[in-house]
Image (tube, rainbow, N blue to C red):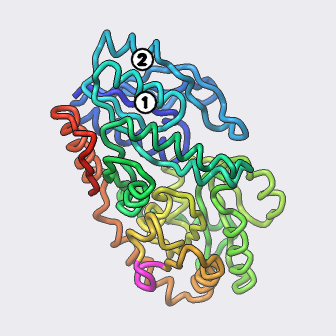
């Protein structure tokens, strides 16, 4: 299969969508597919290394307003039409719904090329976190229009597929998320790293990794941390990542460790060297960080949706609380901070819960779905919810 992937975020950018499609593209290339990635040009980040298994085509873009770490791809109708007329792909997959992705859908349809899409980010839910709550309906309408012009829309969980279908999205299917259980492993625990954090072997280390942005619910996360510290002063807190909120968070919490962005190998060691992971976000479509923490053998607590709903069994391999009860998350966090027996019980069970969620299995299912669309097409009226 000759596959054109259009995305506005890709490695070396660090976020869930970039990581997911970096892995997917690499693995599809290794399976013999000819993959070409169309993404906004970046001059401000180091190169991710020679992409031996796929090609990249840089296109014009601009920093996202109020979020300069990410790029917005500009419409590229002319360039894409020339590219795909000269070398026609068997299928176009649009990973993000910005102007670049929308233009790719239009061009693919005009040329009669099968086109699919992915729903990764709840942009309509983000509007209230950035002071644009009145735009929720128009943003949702835009997302629905972009996706419904493709032959199939992939979302990370069956739960989200059902939600999207109820909102009028058509032909929805699951593209789950894998976890590298070799890279994220309890054996990577490092006593020296814990010592660098000021933590002894019996001191619970609480870690969080992610984009430091308003939609990630950092106010509740920090409230949980404060309650944990009051209940158990031996707790240590490590925050991995960067984003618009980092300067304020670091200024207001000088006792916490802020690492900034780190390489995935380092991230695996950081996870394994901690003990507890608290996931406070309610805008994730999946939450890769949660499954990575579980694979690393951490005691986790989060809201009962997305990855937590799929993998966490309350009281058995972690703690999951109702989405409308933020105080319950604080209580769960305190429970993990003060009950070493509970931590000892759930940590090995967390690892077991995600061991079968390999990228090989996830990509194999996605590959089969893409091949089916590329070879036979999919009637626009056929619902596919896996």
Please determine whether, in this image, residue 87 is positioned above or below residue 304: above
Q: Which one is nearer the viewer's eye here, 377 or 88?
A: 377
- Please report the residue visible at 27 percent of the width from the left and 50 percent of the height from the top: 383
Question: Pointer 1: residues within 10 angstroms few (<14), some, or many (20+)?
Answer: many
Q: Is residue 255 visible?
A: yes
The picture places residue 23, in percent across and down from the top left corner, at 38, 42
- Contact between marks 2 and 1 (CB within 8 A): the answer is yes
* Residue bounds of the magenta highlight: 313-318
Most distant residue in the left direction:
376
The C terminus lies in which quarter of the figure?
Answer: bottom left
- Please report the residue visible at 77 percent of the width from the left and 58 percent of the height from the top: 249
Q: Is residue 334 left or right of residue 271?
A: right
Q: CA distance from mark 2 to mark 1?
A: 10 Å
The picture places residue 298, in percent across and down from the top left corner, at 49, 72
Please determine whether, in this image, residue 167 is positioned above or below residue 237: above
SS at circle 1: strand
The residue to which callout 1 is attached is 6
Please determine whether, in this image, residue 334 is positioned above or below residue 365: below
Q: Which one is nearer the viewer's eye here, 160 or 187?
A: 160
- Please report the residue visible at 41 percent of the width from the left and 34 percent of the height from the top: 94
Q: Is residue 196 visible?
A: no
The residue to which callout 2 is attached is 80
Q: Is residue 115 left or right of residue 269?
A: left
Q: Quadrant of residue 217?
A: bottom right
């Amino acid at each position: 299969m000759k596959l054109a992937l259009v995305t506005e975020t890709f490695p070396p950018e660090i976020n869930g969508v970039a990581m997911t499609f970096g892995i997917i593209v690499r693995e599809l290339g290794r399976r013999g597919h000819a993959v070409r990635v169309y993404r906004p040009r970046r001059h401000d980040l180091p190169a991710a290394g020679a992409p031996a298994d796929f090609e990249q085509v840089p296109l014009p873009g601009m920093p996202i307003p109020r979020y300069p770490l990410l790029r917005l791809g500009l419409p590229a109708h002319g360039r894409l039409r020339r590219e795909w007329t000269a070398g026609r792909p068997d299928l176009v997959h649009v990973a993000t719904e910005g102007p670049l992705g929308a233009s790719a859908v239009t061009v693919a349809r005009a040329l009669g090329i099968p086109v699919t899409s992915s729903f990764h980010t709840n942009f309509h839910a983000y509007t209230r976190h950035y002071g644009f709550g009145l735009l929720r309906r128009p943003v949702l309408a835009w997302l629905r229009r972009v996706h419904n012009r493709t032959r199939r829309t992939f979302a990370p969980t069956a739960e989200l597929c059902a939600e999207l279908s109820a909102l009028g999205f058509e032909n929805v299917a699951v593209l789950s998320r894998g976890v590298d259980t070799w890279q994220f492993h309890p054996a990577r625990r490092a006593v020296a790293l814990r010592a660098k954090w000021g933590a002894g072997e019996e001191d619970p280390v609480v870690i969080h990794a992610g984009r430091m942005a308003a939609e990630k619910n950092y106010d509740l996360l920090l409230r949980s941390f404060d309650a944990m510290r009051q209940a158990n002063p031996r707790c240590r807190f490590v925050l991995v990542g960067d984003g618009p909120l980092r300067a304020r968070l670091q200024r207001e919490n000088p006792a916490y460790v802020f690492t900034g962005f780190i390489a995935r190998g380092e991230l695996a060691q950081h996870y394994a060297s901690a003990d507890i992971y608290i996931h406070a976000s309610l805008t994730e479509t999946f939450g890769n960080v949660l499954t990575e923490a579980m694979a690393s053998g951490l005691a986790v607590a989060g809201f009962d949706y997305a990855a937590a709903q799929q993998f966490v069994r309350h009281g058995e391999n972690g703690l999951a609380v109702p989405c409308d009860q933020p105080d319950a998350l604080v209580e769960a966090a305190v429970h993990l901070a003060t009950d070493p027996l509970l931590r000892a019980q759930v940590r090995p069970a967390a690892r077991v819960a995600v061991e079968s969620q390999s990228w090989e299995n996830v990509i194999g299912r996605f590959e089969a779905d893409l091949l089916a669309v590329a070879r036979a097409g999919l009637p626009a009226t056929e619902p596919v919810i896996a």
